[in-house]
Image: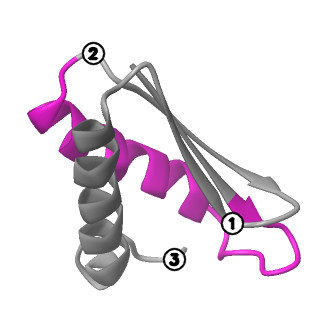
Amino acid sequence: MRVEITLDKTKPLPSGAIEALTDELTKRINHHLPDTRVQVRYAGSNALSVIGGAKTDKILVEEILQQTWESADDWFSPE
């Protein structure tokens, strides 16, 4: 399965945030859905795509994404 997250490029994140978010999401998603590839990148708008998974997988990924975003102070420190 593949998870693609795009973030609005007009609202850039701090340096290193994309890489840190990718790493943290990969760790959390692979805990529940092994062998899932995660890609986070800038694009024209915010979006989430779950490719090759069931509808329940997308719901789980949405929950993990929300939890990860809300806990950013725990796993991300800008340099």
Left or right of 40, for residue 46? right
Kindly identify the residue that appears in the image at 11 percent across and 35 percent down. Answer: 31
**Magenta region:** 7-34
Q: Report the front residue among 59 and 25.
A: 59
> Which numbered disc covers residue 78?
3
Can you tell which quarter of the image residue 65 is in? bottom left
Residue 61 visible in rendering: yes
Label 1 neighbour load within 10 Å: few <14, some 14-19, many 20+: few
Which mark is nearer the camera, 1 or 3? 1
Kindly identify the residue that appears in the image at 28 percent across and 53 percent down. Answer: 59
- Queried whether the magenta region covers residue 13, the answer comes back as yes
Q: Split into 4 quadrants, where in the image is the N terminus?
A: top left
Label 3 neighbour load within 10 Å: few <14, some 14-19, many 20+: few
Left or right of 20, for residue 75? left
> Which numbered disc covers residue 46?
1
Can you tell which quarter of the image residue 56 is in? top left
- Disc 3 marks a residue whose amino acid type is Pro
* Rendering coords of residue 47 (x, y %): 64, 58
Secondary structure beneath disc 1? loop
- Disc 1 marks a residue whose amino acid type is Asn
State the residue position of label 2.
35
Left or right of 45, for residue 60? left
